[in-house]
Amino acid sequence: MAESESITKPTARFEDLRGILRYVPQFRQRVFVIAIDGAVMHQPGFASLLQDVAVLQSLNIEVVLVFGARAQIRSLAERRGVPLTSDDGMSRTDLATLEVAVEAITRQASELMADLTALELPVVISNALVVHPAGVIEGVDQEFTGRIERVDSESLRVLLKADIIPILPPLGYDGRGATLRLNSDAVATEVAIALGAAKVIFVSEAGLTCPDGSRLAQISVADARDIARKRDARHDVNLLSKLRYAALACQEGVPRVHIVDGTQDEALLAELFSNEGVGTMIHADDYQQIRKARSSDIPMLLGMMQQSMDDAALVPRTREQIQSKIKDFFVLETDGNPIGCVAVHSYDEEGRRVAELACLFVRRSHKNRGHGQKLVAYAEDVARQRSCSVLVALSTQAFRFFEEKMGFQVTTPDALPVARREKYDRSGRNSKVLIKALK
């Protein structure tokens, strides 16, 4: 969390730079729509956030900025003594609320322009939104609340191709010239859909959490809708709005939507340029998948496992040994980057089939995030598909994980198939033998 007025960025490490460079080819010339909550713009780390936007543009990523102004509207209304009918553009906006909103948003746009200009970034405030009054909803006239009819995507593309960052405030103008209040989450989503954006990034006042208080790292579109619909008490209306619009964006073709806590320093780059990120990602496709290993994966697998083999946590394996059993190996990927593996070997013996879970490994940087459980569960499914009745695992250091997390029981080496028992005796590793019946 940013707690001081002066934010000092940590020195970049070479591995951080390599991580960024790995993503650059897939992001280059793609559109990112970044929506920043008004409250974030008052945070001490806001200047650093804008510097990160400059980094994105320097990598030839086309950036569109949208900003909210709920905090500024509330503050101004309190000073003026004006009761608000809506502070976020999601419900009725009367004339008094509109006047406060226009003044707060206009001032905020000017300050944002000044900050970006100081970073030598070319920017322009765009009126690329064609809007109309929201009308009457559930019997209530929404007055000066607007809805987006369409986005003038061509004008935005002209700006982007000229390396100019368009800024879209949460205001729009209808065909009669009337000013209408918009919700910034809706603006970001509609712009992203119209431009075929690769990502929407909501830089929010807070992040999404699990029931135990830990970060909610990723969810599907269906789960995002479910949380928004049930109005989970852990999350305020601001976050629920973002989940609702994130689901809509993914449904309409935006591959990834991210929600990050804008109070965290460097949250934007950390979310975009690392496998696990620091916020919540809503995904429309198979962001994380387990696939069959290929021969081309072998150097990567050996590189990942080398330290664990040196530490005697894994049985040493050669390239040739893995190649001979490559059909038994499976790789866990996150956004196309391998982070773990598991192998499932099968044995036929006395009328029964036994499967062995082997070579379970997760990169050190991705441990304690549930990936091991996911790989074991996948291995169980593979064993069932092969008509195996039991799954055995041998472990010298991780047997508690198999017992406490995955429901295995410690047994004796006699439970191993004969061919496997012979290898066990020859190895001299004295591994714990664990077993699990497959239903």
Image (cartoon, rainbow, N blue to C red):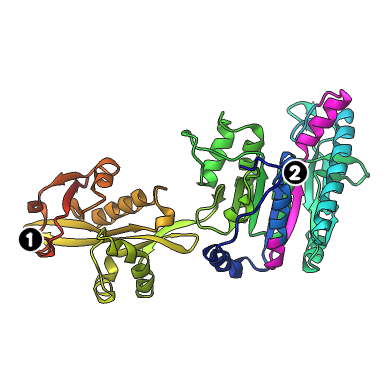
Q: Secondary structure at mark 2?
A: helix
Q: Quadrant of residue 58?
A: bottom right
Rendered view: 360 above or below 296: above
Q: Look at 44% across and 56% down and name the residue there.
A: 365
Q: Position of residue 92 (x, y in %)?
A: 79, 30
Report the disc number at residue 41: 2
Rendered view: 31 above or below 210: below
Instruction: Please tell me whether residue 394 belongs to the stretch shown in magenta.
Output: no
Q: Secondary structure at mark 1?
A: helix
Q: Position of residue 337 (x, y in %)?
A: 47, 63
Report the disc number at residue 279: none
Q: Position of residue 90 (x, y in %)?
A: 74, 35
Q: Disc 1 marks which residue?
A: 418
Q: Nearer the viewer, residue 389 or 5?
A: 5
Few, some or many residues within 10 Å of mark 1 (<14, 14–19, 20+): some
| Residue range of the region highlighted in magenta in the rendering | 55-84
Locate the N terminus and report the quarter of the image it occupies: top right
Instruction: Please tell me whether residue 80 belongs to the stretch shown in magenta.
Output: yes
**Gap between marks 2 and 1, in whole Å?**
67 Å
